[in-house]
């Protein structure tokens, strides 16, 4: 077998915000470090992030601090978050943002010259550091330049298909060049997974083509567990028209900067969905209510900025009740609320996105929007301080890791999560590698087996086409494990996934190994199916509604479930099992933070 071989201390799989931040940290800790990514460097999903990075810097509201950010994050996650991760995240995010600035990131400024911070749903204070609505681009540009300048090795357009292990843990990874189809292997005592999310298992999604859940699946197959997989975030506002762009994100910044949601009768329906504990005043008119809820001096927020799960459910209900827009969404209107110049300056990407893709001028007319699969809260179960997974030498950071966001992520908390836990993962991976230096080796049989598995679709004749299976999976997840769930539907989904698994095992691929997207998809599909099974199994087991998991048959939030996490584990025969885990008690010094404010 022709195989390119490399040896490193730390191999980072993924070159988004989490992967690059981990690589920088590992390199700075003295580790020989490589980054592997499916796309070109700089093209990771993070580049699409629009609204900003949440960090309690106190620039817009001096009274903001990590304690309030911690409380908002925990409440947004409906208290299911790993409290230790939420604490570290809130405490360290401001330093991570300032560090980006030291490395050359140019954030928008306040009139006083501080980093500007914008409003986002679920955050008590305006705290998203941003660069217009292109924050991810600036974040990636900065981290990418720094990694290249430091001398981190980059393997781009390269897919990892297997993690390699021995009885003591990680020994490396196996993959292929997407262009030539040739195989390569990295010997390394530490591997950091930073592979992002799973959205491509759903029909309507804001996620990029890379989000096939590879890291989730690779970790599970290597012996790690996944937590919180039932919690999938449907962002309330994706484009709904024209069909070719359905799902593309309409950033929450539109609402953060004053946009409001209306139904087909022109009513601002979110006033009807304010939870009782938030509802402070009944107003005679919409204008009166608007004035009351947007009173920033008293730290009030418009109802459009309720957490994402709540806004997405409200939109879903309006559409179901027949009050939707012509193409099955609702209207998002910033044109009647802000001057055209303000919209073009604050939301340049949104302006161009709608102009070019839908022929809609958002400074003059309302947008049509609806929920889109956006983010997976569930991921690899990690130690909060080190990002270490259950397999020695394996680490996970960013969207592929679970725990930080509980049942629902607040907007802006992902970019800060990538930076905080990317750095922690890189530091810990370098430390682990130092302890294991000279003790790992790649087993020839394991390499041959990984190559055989990757080539298997070429060996089979007359099998099905990978694209047909992918479409069926996406439709299944959309229809049966989507925004509103019921037991019979999820049972049907699990049956279909089992049948799709059999069909994938019999897939065949035409042509040869040089840039062959059908082959690439055939190798991604088992990951997508395994991860979809975890989502469906965990969602079926959790008999309550909470955050990004809404059960029509169990609409209430259940306090017992509020103390329980579900972890997916893979048995040697390949079946997925669920384990119930009690949440660890929060220490009193953190618990008291919930007494400090409304
Ligand atoms: C349109 C949009 C806007 C968003 N806006 C915001 C925002 O304003 N604020 C915020 O906090 N969050 C936002 N998010 C969420 C946020 O962007 C993501 O959660 C975050 O970027 C994920 O970063 P990551 O580093 O974990 O993964 P990614 O940036 O997706 O990187 C994953 C990397 O892994 C690589 N990879 C995957 N599988 C393999 C494999 N098998 N082998 C090799 N490489 C592999 C990919 O090629 C890629 O390089 C937004 C999301 C979307 C879709």
Image: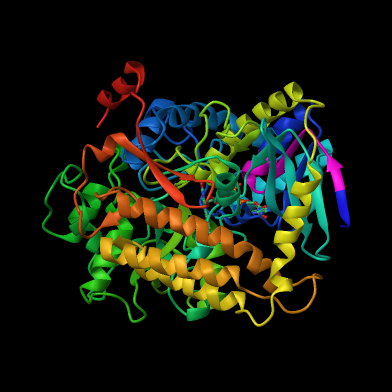
Look at the image and give the residue range highlighted in magenta. Answer: 5-21
Quadrant into which the C terminus falls: top left
Towards the viewer: 11 or 218: 218
Percent across and percent down for residue 461 are 69, 80
User: At 51% across and 44% down in the image, what residue appears?
Assistant: 414
Q: Is residue 58 left or right of residue 286?
A: right
Residue 10 in the image: above or below residue 367 = above
**Image quadrant in which the N terminus is located:** bottom right
In the rendered image, residue 8 lying in the magenta stretch gets the answer: yes
Front residue (pair 487, 97)? 487
Residue depicted at 44% across the width and 61% down the height: 373
**Residue 490 lies in quadrant:** bottom left
Residue 453 image point, x, y percent: 70, 60
Asked if residue 347 shows in the view, the reply is no
Which colouring convention does the figure follow? rainbow
| Residue 116 vertical placement versus 376 (above, below) | above
Relative placement, left or right, of 382 versus 332 is right
Q: Position of residue 537 (x, y in %)?
A: 38, 54
User: Which residue is at the front of the view, 420 or 292?
Assistant: 420
Which residue appears at 32% of the width and 77% of the height?
325
Q: State whether residue 161 appears in this view.
A: yes
Outermost top residue: 589
* Depth order, front residue of 321/504: 504
Q: Is the residue 67 above or below the residue 19 in the image?
A: above
Above or below residue 435? Residue 246 is below
> Where residue 419 sits: x, y (%)?
60, 37
Compared across the picture, whether 29 is left or right of 555 comes to right
Verify whether residue 114 appears in magenta. no
The total number of labels drawn is 0
């Amino acid at each position: 077998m022709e195989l390119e071989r490399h040896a490193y201390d730390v191999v980072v799989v993924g070159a988004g915000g989490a992967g690059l931040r981990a690589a920088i940290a590992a390199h700075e800790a003295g580790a020989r470090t490589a980054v592997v990514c499916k796309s070109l460097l700089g093209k990771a999903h993070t580049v699409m992030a629009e609204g900003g990075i949440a960090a309690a810097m106190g620039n817009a509201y001096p009274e903001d601090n990590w304690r309030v950010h911690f409380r908002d994050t925990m409440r947004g996650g409906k208290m299911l978050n790993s409290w230790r991760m939420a604490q570290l995240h809130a405490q360290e995010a401001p330093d991570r943002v300032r560090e980006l600035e030291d490395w050359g990131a140019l954030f928008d400024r306040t009139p006083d010259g501080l980093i500007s911070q914008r409003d986002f749903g679920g955050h008590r204070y305006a705290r998203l550091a941003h660069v217009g609505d292109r924050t991810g681009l600036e974040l990636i540009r900065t981290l990418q330049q720094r990694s290249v300048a430091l001398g981190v090795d980059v393997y781009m357009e390269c897919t990892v298909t297997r993690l390699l292990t021995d009885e003591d843990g990680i020994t490396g990874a196996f993959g292929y060049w997407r262009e030539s189809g040739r195989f390569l292997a990295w010997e390394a005592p530490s591997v950091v997974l930073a592979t992002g999310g799973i959205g491509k298992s759903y029909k309507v999604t804001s996620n990029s083509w890379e989000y096939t859940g590879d890291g989730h699946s690779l970790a599970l197959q290597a012996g790690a567990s996944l937590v919180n997989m039932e919690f999938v975030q449907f962002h309330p506002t994706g484009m709904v028209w024209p069909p070719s762009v359905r799902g593309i994100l309409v950033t929450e910044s539109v609402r953060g900067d004053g946009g409001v949601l209306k139904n087909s009768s022109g009513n601002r329906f979110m006033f009807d969905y304010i939870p009782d504990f938030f509802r402070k005043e009944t107003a005679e008119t919409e204008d009166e209510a608007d004035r009351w809820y947007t009173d920033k001096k008293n730290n009030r927020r418009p109802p459009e900025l309720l957490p994402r799960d709540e806004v997405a459910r409200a939109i879903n209900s309006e559409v179901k009740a027949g009050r939707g827009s012509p193409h099955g969404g609702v209207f998002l209107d910033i044109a009647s609320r802000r001057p055209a110049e303000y919209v073009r300056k604050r939301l340049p990407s949104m302006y161009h996105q709608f102009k070019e893709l839908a022929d809609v001028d958002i400074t003059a007319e309302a947008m049509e929007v609806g929920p889109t699969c956006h983010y997976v809260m569930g991921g690899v179960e990690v130690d909060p301080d080190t990002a270490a997974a259950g397999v020695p030498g394996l680490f996970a950071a960013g969207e592929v890791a679970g725990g930080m966001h509980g049942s629902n992520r607040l907007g802006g908390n992902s970019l800060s999560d990538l930076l905080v836990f990317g750095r922690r993962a890189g530091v810990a991976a370098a430390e682990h590698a130092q302890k294991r230096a000279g003790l790992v080796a790649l087993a020839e049989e394991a390499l041959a087996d990984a190559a055989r598995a990757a080539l298997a679709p070429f060996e089979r004749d007359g099998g099905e086409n990978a694209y047909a299976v992918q479409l069926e999976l996406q439709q299944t997840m959309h229809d049966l494990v989507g925004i509103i769930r019921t037991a019979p539907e999820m049972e049907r989904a699990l049956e279909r996934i089992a049948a799709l698994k059999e069909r994938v095992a019999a897939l065949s691929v035409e042509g040869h190994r040089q840039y062959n997207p059908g082959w690439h998809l055939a190798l991604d599909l088992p990951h997508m199916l395994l991860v979809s099974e975890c989502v469906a199994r965990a969602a079926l087991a959790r008999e309550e509604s909470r955050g990004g998991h809404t059960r029509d048959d169990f609409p209430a939030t259940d306090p017992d479930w509020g103390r329980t996490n579900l972890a997916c584990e893979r048995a040697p025969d390949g079946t997925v099992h669920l384990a119930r885990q009690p949440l660890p008690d929060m220490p009193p010094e953190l618990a008291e933070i919930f007494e400090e404010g409304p």
